[in-house]
Amino acid sequence: MFGLVRACPPLDVNSIYAYLLLAEHFPDTCILAEDGEGLSGLVTGYRPPGRPDTLFVWQVAVAARARGLGLGCRMLRALLGRPELSRINYVETTVGPGNRASRRMFAGLARGLGASAVETALFDAGLFGAGDHDAEPLLRIGPFERSAALAAAGDVC
């Protein structure tokens, strides 16, 4: 997981330990995709405390060889189709303004779910220290019906 994220700029690379904890503590809200060459994609996420109807997507990474095939969206839809996430009616994420691929994917997910996507300020660039980091606005998709998520599960964003 660490290696895939490291190979997918502009994603922030977290520690190996962080990815181990995500896989161990949040298996219901994380998903991996593999192909003949190994790990080809991942989605990490969690349900924010006190909001069982929301899936917060932390990172979506797709290996270069699998980009442009809708894998990120298919992984998100697979997550939304899990019985453990049957109460999810909103997807939230933060996407920097320069990350066009992620913005397109989440816009496509919202369209496919028949849901609105609303962007609001969340983390200002200054909160990330002296480095060159974009602001991270919050993107909230929803509400949507579980039946819409399941019906469109095979569709590409």
Image (cartoon, helix red, strand yellow):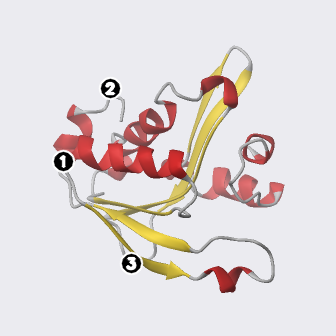
**Gap in angstroms between the C-alphas marked 1 and 3:** 25 Å
The image quadrant that residue 39 belongs to is top right
- Which structural element holds mark 2? loop
Q: Earlier in the sequence, mark 1 or mark 3?
A: 3
- Label drawn at residue 154: 2
Q: Are marks 3 and 2 in contact (CB under 8 Å)?
A: no
Question: What kind of residue is marked 1?
Answer: Gly
**Residue at the disc numbered 3:** 50
Looking at this view, is 65 or 58 the one in front? Answer: 65
Q: Which residue is mark 1?
A: 114
Q: Looking at this view, is 20 or 119 the one in front?
A: 119
Q: Kindly report the distance in space between the C-alpha atoms of the residues bearing marks 3 and 2.
A: 30 Å
Q: Is residue 134 above or below residue 88?
A: below
Q: Quadrant of the N terminus?
A: top right
The amino acid type found where label 2 is placed reads Gly
Which of label 3 and label 2 is nearer to you?
2
- Amino acid type, label 3: Gly
Residue 21 at x, y = what percent? 70, 58
